[in-house]
Amino acid sequence: MLETGFKVLFVLVFFVIAYKLIFSGSRGLTIFEMHFKEGKLNKHSGKIPERFSRECKAIAKAEKLTCTVRAEKQGDVRLHVSANVSDKLTQRIRNVFPFEYYDKKQPDNSKLKG
């Protein structure tokens, strides 16, 4: 009885660890996130470039969008738009996103100069 309990516990722990390894590592560092509901900015987090915020709000207002726009950094910057938004509107949002703002190489100041 005790042995079967240990076996079941071991299998459950194995599945939990496998699930975490498979599904938790897919996201990078979230730079910002914007939530729109019926064309209005409902909530946001992170540092959003001012021009992108203004133009994205205008697109969302004109099209009455309910979606999430998120930028993540995984080596390079990726822009994610909710799947319920049409491809045409997703492309319009991507066109106003300043990818070049995030592509700048930061100088390495970690080494002491002397």
Image: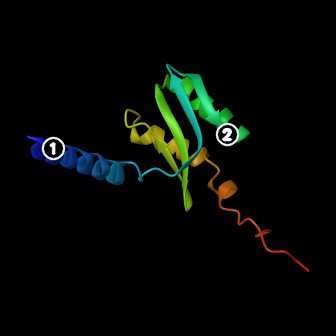
Q: Nearer the viewer, residue 111 or 11?
A: 11
Quadrant, the N terminus: top left
Q: Nearer the viewer, residue 107 or 94?
A: 107
Identify the residue under disc 2.
Answer: 48
Taking 27 as reference, is 73 left or right?
right
Say whether marks 2 and 1 touch (CB < 8 Å): no
- Other-residue count near label 1 (Cα within 10 Å), few / some / many at <14 / 14–19 / ≥20: few
Quadrant, the C terminus: bottom right
Q: Quadrant of residue 112?
A: bottom right
Disc marking residue 8 = 1
**Amino acid marked by disc 1:** Val
Residue 69 on image: x %, y %: 52, 37
Residue at position x 46%, y 30% from top?
67
Q: Quadrant of residue 88?
A: top left
Measure the alpha-carbon separation of dots 2 and 1. Answer: 47 Å
Label 2 vs 1, first from the N-terminus: 1
